[in-house]
Image (cartoon, rainbow, N blue to C red):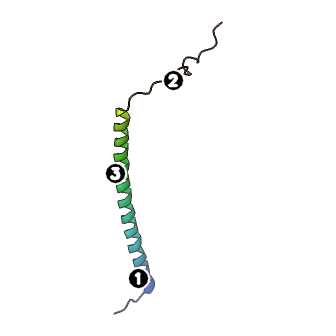
Amino acid sequence: MGIDCAPSALFFLVCLVLLWLLFRLSLQVAEQRSQIQRLAQELAVLTAQREPPVPPEGTASEDAGPPAR
């Protein structure tokens, strides 16, 4: 009751390993996608809670125009 064709068995085992690897990587991608979404939501909340920045005196918006004559 042996394997008649050894290369076929090797090919089958390699296919199984590749399927297992694909499944494992897809789980990691799904986990990282949920982590990215959670971090983006936290960033949005923290940005909304932060006070608006006070522009320093003499900003570029005041000096943006051409010199007056």
Q: Name the residue under label 3.
A: 34
Quadrant assignment, res 61: top right
Q: Is mark 2 on a helix, strand or loop?
A: loop
Q: Which of 27 and 6 is in front in this view?
A: 27
Question: Which badge, 1 or 3, is on the more N-terminal residue?
Answer: 1
Q: Is residue 23 left or right of residue 68?
A: left
Q: In this view, does 53 lie to the left or right of 35?
A: right
- What is the CA distance from the residue labelled 2 to the residue labelled 1? 72 Å
Type of amino acid under label 1 = Ala
Mark sitting on residue 56: 2
Question: Percent x, y for residue 11?
Answer: 43, 78
Please say if the residues under marks 3 and 2 sit with CB atoms less than 8 Å apart: no
Question: Which badge, 3 or 2, is on the more N-terminal residue?
Answer: 3
- What is the CA distance from the residue labelled 3 to the residue labelled 2? 39 Å
Neighbourhood count class around disc 2 (C-alpha, 10 Å): few under 14, some 14–19, many 20 upward: few
Q: Mark 3 or 2, which is nearer the eye?
A: 2
Please say if the residues under marks 2 and 1 sit with CB atoms less than 8 Å apart: no
- What is the CA distance from the residue labelled 1 to the residue labelled 3? 38 Å
Q: What element carries label 1?
A: helix
Does 57 appear above or below 45?
Answer: above
Does 13 appear above or below 21?
Answer: below
Q: Mark 2 or 1, which is nearer the eye?
A: 2
